Image (cartoon, rainbow, N blue to C red):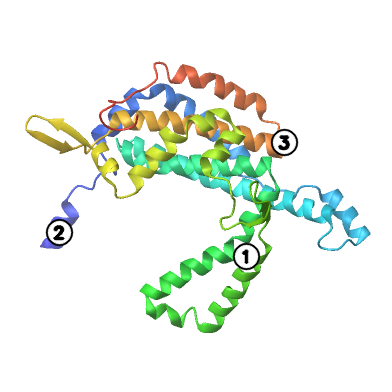
Amino acid sequence: MADEQHEQSPRPKTVGNLLAQQRFIQRHSAFLTEYPKIAELCEKVFNRTLVPPGAIEYQQLLVQNPKEDDPAVIAWEERLTASYLIFQLGIMAADDFTTVLLLTGNGAGFASFIHLRSIYERLVHAMYMALRTSEALVFADSSPINKLNYLTRLVKFIPALKQRYDDAFMEQLRKDAEVSRAARKQSICSKCKQPTTQHAWTRVSLDSMACEVDRTLGELYGVIYLEGTNQAHANSMGMERRLEEIEGGYRYKALSENEAAVALRYAHYLMLRLLMMQDDHFGLGLNKGIQERMAKFEQVWLPEPTTDQSGGAV
């Protein structure tokens, strides 16, 4: 009988907040009209086989049979690694954009900022490696160190995993991590003139990287990255953002549609910048189409969405 009642129960026709979705479609009709053209550009940029850079140059290097530490070999490896990382960071950012679209479409503005932060971070890292290809090898070489830190802590809290990651596996990972640490670049301290070992994949903070690659991205560090960080972690500021004052106290903002509009606008802009930098780096010949979409951006977002300064995105 219970099974029959279950079968007769109407299945939901949508997942999420239907009323919020309807309001989103009505409020953002201009963006939704523009979106398919952005998606088409994303398809051209990311749904392709990545061709290694400098193939002819590499063949010439092989003929010369240079040593591994030859500057020409290192420079080629830097460009090759940078291209792969820039491409993959771009795909991940585009994936984050889809997540932001789904969240904003359901009125989840605060949650949108968490993934908006990811788009921003991946874009800045990609642009920084495009500007400084030598940093790509440092980024890639940090992988064994990250894996060791992760698995060491994971096995500590889940001892049963020691059967999967046995002593021999962990010891090899430690050796790989030591090699990576030893290979990390060194810089000269401006004060003491002594070598300074690099402990992170780059000595440059994200806000400094953003300011170096693009002034506008530097200016957006606070409203995108810091806001997203507050929403991603358990802290009082992130909590206060999600409260609204009512008579007799405060209540939690289950829907944050104004914040969602702000997040969507930022995500739209970051995606256009992402497409632009991918086109510039790989020479895809899509500049005309991207510039047309950039020109439409201002039309789509007039007037620019805002939120209450007492809560939500600022």
Q: Which of marks 2 and 3 is nearer the N terminus?
A: 2
Which residue is depicted at the point 90% across and 53% down? 60
Residue 44 is situated, as x and y percent measured from the top left of the image, at 62, 38
In the shown orientation, is residue 90 left or right of residue 73? left
Residue labelled with disc 2: 4
Identify the amino acid type marked 1: Arg
Contact check, label 1 and label 2, Cβ < 8 Å: no
Residue labelled with disc 3: 283
Q: Which of marks 3 and 1 is nearer the N terminus?
A: 1
**Mark 3 packing: few (<14 Cα in 10 Å), some, or many (20+)?**
few
Which is closer to the viewer, label 3 or label 1?
1
Q: Which quarter of the rendering shows the C terminus?
A: top left
Which residue is depicted at the point 59% across and 31% down? 214
**214 relative to 234, above or below:** above
Identify the amino acid type marked 2: Glu
Dot 1 falls on a residue whose secondary structure is helix
Residue 27 is situated, as x and y percent measured from the top left of the image, at 33, 23
Contact check, label 3 and label 1, Cβ < 8 Å: no
Q: Which of marks 1 and 2 is nearer the N terminus?
A: 2
Identify the disc placed on residue 181.
1
